[in-house]
Amino acid sequence: MKIPLKKTPAIHRPRNKVLGVPELIAIALGGMVGGGIFTILGISVSMIGVYTPLAIALGGIVAAMAAYSYIKLGVYYKDEGSTYAFYKKTFPKSPFAASLIGWWVIFGYISTLALYSYTFASYAISGFTFADNEWIRKLVAGGIISVFTLVNILSVKGMGKIEDLMVYTKLVILVVISFVLINNSNTTLPTLIEHNGTISILDIMIVASITFVAYEGFELVINAVNEMEKPEKNIPRAIYAAIFLAILIYLVIALGAILTIPFADIIQNKEYALASGADKILGHWGTELVIIGALLATSSAISGTVFGASRQMSAIAEDRYLPAYLTKHSRRIPVYAVLTLSALAFVLVLSGSLQLILEFGSVTFLIISLLMAFANFRIRHQTNSSAFITLTSLFGLAVATVLVFYSEISTQPVQMALILGTYILLTIGAWLYAKKVRRKNRLGVLG
């Protein structure tokens, strides 16, 4: 079964065409460079100040650790389904393993959809007097989710054209924003470090772990495995190159922001950090450019997430690990899956702050990547993987996951209880559906 994932690729070609490495890199960058940098910047500066670029770079290293197992499994299985399909094939006799990864992956997409829509809303209202009104922000977030829900339900073709336009435009604008910020810097890194105060390595590592969600999306390259030549060479080349380029883009934007915009403005308005001080430094046109870039980046991510995640949700339901109504289609569109995904994302927006949603997304994909690394280690001889690198990746991803939990327990114990409670409910739900599948399989064998 071929299972579409989170986002449609930025490049669409007939299946008899071959995608080269540059095109595959564009697909991965289109997936990664969404609303992440606009979201993590303000929170990171509020936690570690001038060391934000270092944390972003370390987050990229964690992403590269996660990518190693995705690449090995992708080359071995050559299945467009990626995460869910890989885990199901690695543990074919365990319905619970397939159900668990399916539930967690879908929740990961729900959390990123909530994150992107929240960030969209923050930048969309940043120029108004009610910019800090939390409920208006949440309602605008629900509105943009509704817009792309309707687009996905009414016209897949129209969604694809909109997605292509947003992907390429946002990359151009992000590059322009980066150079404009750097050219307008009014201080130096040594000066900022001198006045930053004491920041521990632990704090930097925690922020690096939280920023992991900004790199989620590199696995989209694997979705095009049937449309590329030499996947055993081109998948690793494209994914590692895209992660490296994403790190560079994020670093330049972060450096430009901390060298140009006063920390007080970034921290006070962390939900829309880049726009917070741009008007004073870059003028009105500069602020508008930042806002347009943020809206395009988050819109692209919202559109692709609704499209791909709803189809994976429907595919998992066809395997009976999610409610059966999610399999219903209209004009080949999984309407009920689209509506359910969007509704759950809006519920998450209503229930939490930006930092809660960000940490939900980061820790969920960290755990999913940890499970993928475990799957790769289990069949490392078949995937021709290095035991040392795989174990190192497992360790790094485990440490990053623990650090996020530690941060929550230390600073937001109630929020931590909410996160743990959510994961427990997801696990129970996965177990119950796996139990049903086992029972039906057993009855089928007896019959």
Image (cartoon, rainbow, N blue to C red):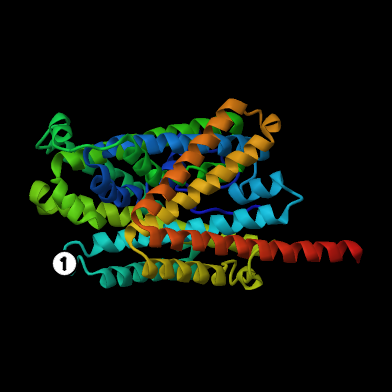
The vertical placement of 388 against 254, above or below, is above
Quarter location, residue 68: top right
The residue at the point 47 percent across, 32 percent down is 240
Q: What residue type is labelled 1?
A: Phe
Left or right of residue 231, residue 194 in this image: left
The residue at the point 41 percent across, 52 percent down is 164
Place of residue 412 in the rendered image (x, y in percent of width and height, measured from the top left): 35, 57
In this view of the protein, can residue 139 be seen by the observer?
yes
Q: Nearer the viewer, residue 390 or 313?
A: 390
Left or right of residue 440, residue 209 in this image: left
- Disc 1 target residue: 128
The residue at the point 52 percent across, 70 percent down is 340
Left or right of residue 56, residue 337 in this image: right
The vertical placement of 33 against 138, above or below, is above
In this view of the protein, can residue 160 be seen by the observer?
no
Which structural element holds mark 1? Answer: loop
Q: Residue furthest right?
A: 447
Place of residue 339 in the rendered image (x, y in percent of width and height, measured from the top left): 50, 71
The residue at the point 41 percent across, 48 percent down is 406
Numbered circles on residues, count: 1
Indicate the quadrant containing the C terminus: top left, top right, bottom left or bottom right: bottom right
Place of residue 211 in the rendered image (x, y in percent of width and height, measured from the top left): 37, 45
Place of residue 13 in the rendered image (x, y in percent of width and height, measured from the top left): 52, 46
Left or right of residue 329, residue 288 in this image: left
Question: Badge 1, how many Cα within 10 Å: few under 14, some, many 20+?
Answer: few
Q: Nearer the viewer, residue 170 or 113?
A: 113
